[in-house]
């Protein structure tokens, strides 16, 4: 079963996305801030991480950079979840080491396609 | 006499002789003429103490050689004027041998005139210089009466007398000459005062008669037209001949007139050509002389004497000849006098006019004065002067003098009346009979104008106005002389008008400039060539806190700069002194030491092409900078707000969209079909809200100037395919046919791919939205023209179309065909507004045509190469001006603006995009900012020169590979090679060579970046 680490501080988004992913057969772990995300990534070693960018404690960019700087976690694909209008956010995300990004509000089909693509690449 | 005075002692005699001799000497010395000298000799020698019986003084008549007795004592029966012919008498002896002769016994001398006389005699010569002028004769009734002593005394007396005669004769000549001179002077003086020619001639003649000491005279003037003489003056000639004429060769005067030679007729009555008119009583002898000016005969003057003895001779001729030229000139002057007087008056009038100019500032008054003068000068009754108004092409009457109704301020069209006629033809005109003239103006029907004359006021070929003079009497005929005078006056008046105009214009300009400076909110200061302040305006005083008196003569930079800014200030000053305008922003010091932010300009002040100083302008930009800071802060706040808002709105929207979608899925799975439709409505409304938020955000960003362009080169065909792929499902969903026309020849473009895609999606989805079961088409074409290379995208549909009113507002934000449209067709109503704004940003435009019920056509036109609006370039103001830039971007670094402009022209024509920098450091900055395809570098530049700039470019990792072409007058390749120059061009640059070099180094492809 594919294990997904979802790092998202907004409760509703978290609930909605996790429920839909679980429904589609993913094993979803939740982190609510960047630091927690990094910790869980290191301890659980998920197959893929969905990372919101504006996070408390440690923001998504820093968290991603931290993971990509760590040889233990560098191989875990990270999909950044960004706001639509912030074109700069997306570029910053890629610059921080994210493997892909998707724009909120999430269109599940599109996101699933990206998850699949990255896992195949890894696999 | 020794015999008579025998009883006297010798000493007493000696003393008396001495005193007698002294009296003699004193008398001779006091004598003022020949007669007085002679008298003095006689009276001195007849002194009793000397005891001579007869003393006589004879002077020689130079013409006859006769001895003429001038003074004597002791002889009975002799008188002054008694003559002794040559060859007679003892007294002739000294004249023959210049010796003193003593005859102790005259009775023994054969030739003695007094044959009966007895006694002794001494004859003494009178010698003036070496000339014998006379004889002194001393006699005694006794024989042997003269001793040695007597002879000595007499010899001394004769010598003294001779000296005295010489002196008085010289005196006489002198006196004569001064009398002549005085007479001539008087004559000339008379002429200047004598206005009437006949009076003058009479005066002349009278004076000549007086001067010569003759009894009468006549003066005739030569009538050139008649070829004869007209007797103009006659004095003491018996019958008055004035007014009668004489033919040339007739009489003495006629003869002189014919020969131009003077004539002396000693015995007129015996002369063969004599005129019977002149009787013996009046004319015995005649002298006549021609009056000539150069070789031209003016007249003849004749002097006559009625005394046959006195007669007239060579001496009279000499005087007359001396007099004649003066008289001729006098006559000529008198003849010319009236003309002369007129001319003088003209000159005075003109002088007055010119003199007035200095004081006369009011053109209207000046013209009025001009007219008054012209009326006086031309002897007319009225005058008018009109000024030609070049702008409107008509005449404005500016001054009027004695013309009846005051017409000042009224206008006349060219061709209207005499003045209008002159304005049209530029020729002076004389109208002898104004009331009958076909071109007369109805203005002057009161008979005030009977004759008229008008002349143009011209400067070169330019008409300034017209002057007209009139006379109320038909008798006044204007002739050529009048016309000439008016023309002369018009010329001078034109100059006067022009000068007054120029003066007024100059004064206005000066005043304008003065007001401009004094009231200018910008601080203005002027400097001489030594950098010293020569003036400043109130704004300067206010800005810097110095009073004008304090700053005059001070060095500006030292006054308003501190240590940090003095060097930078000097560079502005130098720039302005080199004849260029220097601009910048800087901090300057006030009097109290505080600094003020200023925008400054140093402007060279040129007079007749010579720089005489500079003008410094300072604009306090404290408020401006503060406002700019505030605006920047506000803008940042707005951007932050937008970013935050978009985030904050999106988060709940995510939930709405996500949960509604999720619930719909679950309802489907659970078989609760009744909910699905409603959940989908929530989802659809949420998506619309999201689109609205996105569009509002886009529009806000555009309007805040926050939208940035990401220019790249891409294939138009590929981009169109992507758009079609996206839109095709929607089109098919509406049951529309999709037609696309995009030939390969449209090739590539350099623009913002994302924005163009967004535009096309907007247009196509719009077209599709309003069309059902119809056709939506997209056609792309490419055209090159004078204004560059353009791509045109046409989006056409066969949908519902728009009314003209709808069409008018189609690109405005938040408008759709009608409120219901949104409900029926969806969309935010912002898509087309964004579309239009994007197309403007890309250098193009979008337009719409529509036919209600038939469909619409949207046409997007974009340049193949989008212009770059770099803020820094726009601020510089000189570096922009974009060429199409197909050939690449070239940075010109040259301190000479002329050289830059030339290079720009050449390169822009060859399709290069050109940016410029005025010095090395600016060049370096612009190179880093714009990364041009190639750089041209001038070698000799102030500050950082070409070599230093080259070095800096090669040392910059981002620029190291940029081709750098050195443009130089110095062909110093080794230096350039060492520093890494890519190529060389020698100034003056060859156009072809420059373009080719740039093509090689920029690459010739269109994908320049």
Image (cartoon, rainbow, N blue to C red):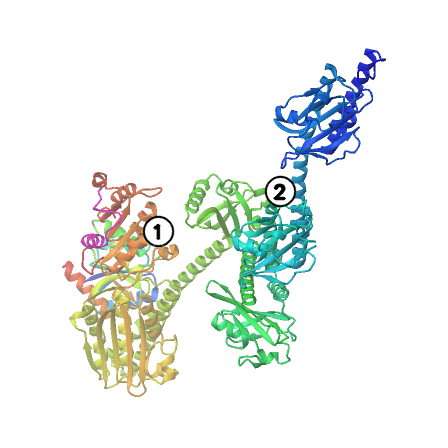
Residue where numbered disc 1 is placed: B897
Picture quarter with the N terminus of chain B: top right
Tell me the SS state at disc 2.
helix
Is label 2 in contact with label 1 (beta carbons under 8 Å)? no
Question: Can residue B217 be seen here?
Answer: yes
Give the residues drawn in magenta, as a range: B979-1001
Q: Nearer the viewer, mark 2 or mark 1?
A: 2
Residue B736: in magenta span: no
Please say if B872 is above or below B847: above
For mark 1, name the chain.
Answer: B
- In the current view of this chain or complex, which residue is farthest to the right? B7
Q: Tell me the residue that label 2 is attached to.
A: B315
| Foreground residue among A58 and B228 | B228
Task: From the top left corner, tell me how far across and down residue B911 is, in percent.
Answer: 24, 60
Local SS, label 1: helix
In which quadrant of the rendered view does residue A2 lie? bottom left
- In the image, residue B385 above or below residue B626: below
Q: Position of residue B540 (x, y in %)?
A: 55, 49
The reply, left or right, for residue B265 in relation to residue A58 is right
At x 45%, y 47%, the residue is B611
Q: Quadrant of the C terminus of chain B?
A: bottom left
């Amino acid at each position: 079963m594919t294990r997904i680490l979802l790092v998202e501080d907004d409760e509703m988004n978290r609930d909605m996305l996790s429920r839909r992913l679980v429904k589609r057969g993913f094993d979803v772990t939740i982190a609510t801030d960047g630091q927690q995300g990094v910790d869980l990534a290191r301890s659980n070693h998920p197959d893929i991480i969905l990372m919101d960018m504006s996070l408390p404690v440690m923001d998504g960019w820093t968290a991603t950079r931290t993971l990509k700087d760590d040889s233990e976690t560098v191989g875990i694909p990270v999909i950044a979840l960004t706001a639509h209008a912030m074109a700069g956010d997306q570029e910053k995300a890629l610059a921080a080491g994210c493997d892909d990004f998707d724009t909120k509000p999430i269109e599940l089909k599109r996101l699933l396609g990206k998850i699949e693509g990255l896992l195949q690449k890894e696999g | 006499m020794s015999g008579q005075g025998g009883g006297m002692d010798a000493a007493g005699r000696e003393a008396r002789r001495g005193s007698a001799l002294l009296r003699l000497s004193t008398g001779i010395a006091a004598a003022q003429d020949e007669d007085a000298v002679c008298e003095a000799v006689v009276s001195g020698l007849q002194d009793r103490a000397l005891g001579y019986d007869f003393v006589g003084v004879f002077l020689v008549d130079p013409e006859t050689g006769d001895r003429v007795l001038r003074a004597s004592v002791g002889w009975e029966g002799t008188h002054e004027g008694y003559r002794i012919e040559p060859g007679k008498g003892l007294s002739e002896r000294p004249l023959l041998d210049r010796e003193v002769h003593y005859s102790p016994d005259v009775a023994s001398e054969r030739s003695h005139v007094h044959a009966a006389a007895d006694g002794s005699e001494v004859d003494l010569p009178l010698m003036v210089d070496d000339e014998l002028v006379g004889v002194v004769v001393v006699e005694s009734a006794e024989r042997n009466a003269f001793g040695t002593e007597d002879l000595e005394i007499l010899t001394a007396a004769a010598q003294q007398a001779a000296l005295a005669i010489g002196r008085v004769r010289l005196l006489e000549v002198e006196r004569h000459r001064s009398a002549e001179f005085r007479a001539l002077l008087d004559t000339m003086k008379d002429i200047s005062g004598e206005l009437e020619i006949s009076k003058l001639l009479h005066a002349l003649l009278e004076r000549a008669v007086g001067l010569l000491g003759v009894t009468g005279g006549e003066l005739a003037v030569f009538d050139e037209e008649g070829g004869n003489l007209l007797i103009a003056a006659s004095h003491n000639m018996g019958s008055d001949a004035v007014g009668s004429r004489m033919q040339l060769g007739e009489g003495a005067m006629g003869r002189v007139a014919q020969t131009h030679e003077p004539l002396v007729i000693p015995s007129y009555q015996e002369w063969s050509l004599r005129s019977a008119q002149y009787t013996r009583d009046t004319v015995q002898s005649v002298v006549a002389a021609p009056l000539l000016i150069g070789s031209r005969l003016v007249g003849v003057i004749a002097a006559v004497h009625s005394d046959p003895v006195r007669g007239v001779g060579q001496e009279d001729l000499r005087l007359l000849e001396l007099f004649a030229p003066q008289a001729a000139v006098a006559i000529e002057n008198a003849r010319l006098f009236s003309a002369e007087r007129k001319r003088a008056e003209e000159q005075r009038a003109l002088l007055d006019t010119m003199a007035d100019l200095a004081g006369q500032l009011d053109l209207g008054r000046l013209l009025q004065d001009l007219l008054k003068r012209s009326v006086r000068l031309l002897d007319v009754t009225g005058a008018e002067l009109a000024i030609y108004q070049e702008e409107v092409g008509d005449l404005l009457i500016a001054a009027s003098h004695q013309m009846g109704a005051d017409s000042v301020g009224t206008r006349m069209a060219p061709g209207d009346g005499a003045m209008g006629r002159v304005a049209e033809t530029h020729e002076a005109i004389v109208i002898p009979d104004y009331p009958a003239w076909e071109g007369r103006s109805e203005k002057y029907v009161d008979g005030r104008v009977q004759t008229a004359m008008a002349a143009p006021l011209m400067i070169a070929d330019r008409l300034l106005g017209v002057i007209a003079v009139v006379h109320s009497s038909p008798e006044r005929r204007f002739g050529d002389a009048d016309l000439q005078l008016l023309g002369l006056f018009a010329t001078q008046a034109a100059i006067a008008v022009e000068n007054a105009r120029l003066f007024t214009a100059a004064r206005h300009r000066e005043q304008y400039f003065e007001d401009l400076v004094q009231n200018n909110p910008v601080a203005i200061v002027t400097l001489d060539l030594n950098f010293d302040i020569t003036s400043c305006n109130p704004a300067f005083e206010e800005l810097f806190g110095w009073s004008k008196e304090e700053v005059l003569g001070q060095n500006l930079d030292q006054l308003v700069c501190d240590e940090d800014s003095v060097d930078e200030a000097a560079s502005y000053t130098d720039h302005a002194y080199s004849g260029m305008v220097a601009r910048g922003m800087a901090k300057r010091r006030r009097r109290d030491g505080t600094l003020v932010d200023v925008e400054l300009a140093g402007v060279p002040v040129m007079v007749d092409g010579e720089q005489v100083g500079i003008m410094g302008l300072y604009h306090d930009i404290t408020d401006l900078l503060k406002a700019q800071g505030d605006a920047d802060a506000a803008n940042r706040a707005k951007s932050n707000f937008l970013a935050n808002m978009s985030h904050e709105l999106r988060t709940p929207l995510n939930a709405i969209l996500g949960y509604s979608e999720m619930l719909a899925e679950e309802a489907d799975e659970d078989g609760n079909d009744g909910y699905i439709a409603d959940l989908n409505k929530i989802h659809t409304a949420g998506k619309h809200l999201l689109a609205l938020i996105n569009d509002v955000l886009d529009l806000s960003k555009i309007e805040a100037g926050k939208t940035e362009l990401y220019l790249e080169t891409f294939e138009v065909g590929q981009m169109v395919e992507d758009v079609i792929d996206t839109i095709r499902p929607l089109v098919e969903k509406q049951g529309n046919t999709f037609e696309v026309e995009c030939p390969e020849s449209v090739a590539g473009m350099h623009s913002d791919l994302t924005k163009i895609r967004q535009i096309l999606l907007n247009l196509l989805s719009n077209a599709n939205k309003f069309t059902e079961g119809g056709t939506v088409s997209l056609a792309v074409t490419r055209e090159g023209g004078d204004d560059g290379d353009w791509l045109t995208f046409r989006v056409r549909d066969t949908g519902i179309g728009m009314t003209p009113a709808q069409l008018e507002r189609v690109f405005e934000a938040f408008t759709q065909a009608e409120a219901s449209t949104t409900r029926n067709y969806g969309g935010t109503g912002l898509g087309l507004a964004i579309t239009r704004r994007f197309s403007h940003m890309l250098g193009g435009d979008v337009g719409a045509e529509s036919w209600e019920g038939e469909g619409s056509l949207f046409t997007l036109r974009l340049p193949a190469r989008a212009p770059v609006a770099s803020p820094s370039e726009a601020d510089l103001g000189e570096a922009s001006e974009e060429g199409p830039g197909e050939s690449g971007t070239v940075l010109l670094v040259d301190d000479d603006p002329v050289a830059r402009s030339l290079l720009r022209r050449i390169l822009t024509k060859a399709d290069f995009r050109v940016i410029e920098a005025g010095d090395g450091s600016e060049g370096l900055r612009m190179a880093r900012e714009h990364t041009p395809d190639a750089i041209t570098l001038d070698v000799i530049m102030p500050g950082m020169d070409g070599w230093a700039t080259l070095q800096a470019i090669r040392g910059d990792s981002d620029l190291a590979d940029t081709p750098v072409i050195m443009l130089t007058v110095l062909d110093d390749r080794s230096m350039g090679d060492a520093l890494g120059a890519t190529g060389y061009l020698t100034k003056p640059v060859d156009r072809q060579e420059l373009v080719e070099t740039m093509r090689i180094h920029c690459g010739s492809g269109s994908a320049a970046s």
